[in-house]
Amino acid sequence: MTLPAFGHVLSLTDEIGIFEHADHAEPRREHGYCTDDAARLLIVAVREPDHSQAIRELSRTAFRFLAASQSATGTVRNRRSANGRWPGRWHGRHVTDDCWGRSLWAFGTAARSAPEDWMRSSAMSYFDHGVKHRSVHRRSMAFAALGAAEVAAYDHRHLRARSLLADAITTIGRPGTDPRWPWPETRLSYANAALPEALIAAGHVLDRPDVVDDGLSLLGWLLDRETHDGHLSPTPAGGSDRDATAPRFDQQPIEVAAIADACARAHAVTGDDAWRRGVDLAIGWFAGANDVGAVMWDSATSGGYDGLTPDGPNLNQGAESTLALIATMQHAPRPEPIGGRGSVTGPVWSTSRAAR
């Protein structure tokens, strides 16, 4: 399979940030930007082993956006208009919703993995500023916990990161006692695999094997539920309850990326190669091993399609879907470099704007 590249991400990004929506491959500038996407962009940019100038510029743009989104108290605002202004009233409020959690995830990832010293140092400062808060929302806390796990891996004695991990365990909750529905919520909604991944990460950092086991148990159940006829069939945009049957639509790339990340972490923590199955299913979903048999990215632009419907892909190529595609493919094996000088562990990415 030919792997997608960063070309479409570059076409969606200007000096302010990455535009949230697209009409096919064309950015819908009138809809502006959001902090959630800036966080996703920073995560995939600093995770990318290719530290080319184009990737560094993407990470700097995302970092500046996230820094501007954070308030003096450490809370975060999400929406920003195309002219660079942060709207007032509801959209201008600083909150501890998903945008807060994702920004901490991104700052934590950058503090550990950014290629530039200034960004690692500054990211740690912004993380420290935001980690004082807590959210009542499970996913917000799960996203924040993934950033805290990155910080704790970098500085095992970082007390605020460890405290947030402990609080995230409590907020997410333990599996239920019904083996048919052990999920800690009455419905599956979005980014579901982030919950067990956060438990696995938190349990590993805090030396809580019981919490790691809870996360592995929930992830295994979710993966079984979202596997249909040998391929991934993720929870649709509207969510699903215990009586829902597969296939369900519209399926979102964010669900697939969450599965890939969670299974990759389960593999890293346990060393059990069986978890690679989930990563492979996620990669396969984008390649066409899904309920419709449709490839979920545009090879001409390297953009990810916005969703899978019963009739095929939604051909719009927004930021969330494209970044979910890249995040998933970062777990794919890299081909051996030309010249045969060993191998690396991830896809080769083109950063040319001409990729469009």
Image: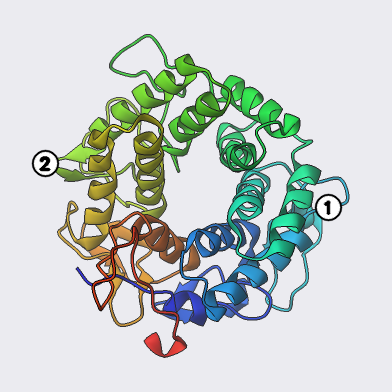
Outermost residue toward the bottom in this view: 354
Image-based side of 308 in relation to 156, left or right: left
For the question of whether residue 233 can be seen, the reply is: yes
Residue 137 appears at what percent x and percent y?
Answer: 61, 33
The type of colouring in the image is rainbow
Number of numbered labels in the structure image: 2
Residue 351 versus residue 234: which sits nearer the camera?
351
For the question of whether residue 174 can be seen, the reply is: no
User: Label 1 amino acid?
Assistant: Ser
Give the distance between the C-alpha atoms of the residues marked 2 and 1, in whole angstroms: 47 Å
Mark 1, residue position: 71
- The residue drawn where x is 23% and y is 47% is 281
User: Label 2 amino acid?
Assistant: Asp
Question: Quadrant of the rendered structure where residue 46 is?
Answer: bottom right
Q: From what the image shows, is residue 142 above or below residue 182? A: below
Image-based side of 356 in relation to 231, left or right: right
Residue 122 versus residue 63: which sits nearer the camera?
122
Outermost residue toward the top in this view: 177
The local crowd at label 2, few if under 14, some if 14 to 19, many if 20 or more residues have their Cα within 10 Å, is few
Q: From what the image shows, is residue 71 above or below residue 116? A: above
- The residue drawn where x is 35% and y is 47% is 260
Question: Quadrant of the rendered structure where residue 189 is?
Answer: top left
The local crowd at label 1, few if under 14, some if 14 to 19, many if 20 or more residues have their Cα within 10 Å, is some
Secondary structure under tag 1 reads loop
Residue 240 appears at what percent x and percent y?
Answer: 35, 35
Mark 2, residue position: 229
- The residue drawn where x is 25% and y is 68% is 336
Residue 132 appears at what percent x and percent y?
Answer: 79, 36
Image-based side of 294 in relation to 275, left or right: left
Secondary structure under tag 2 reads loop
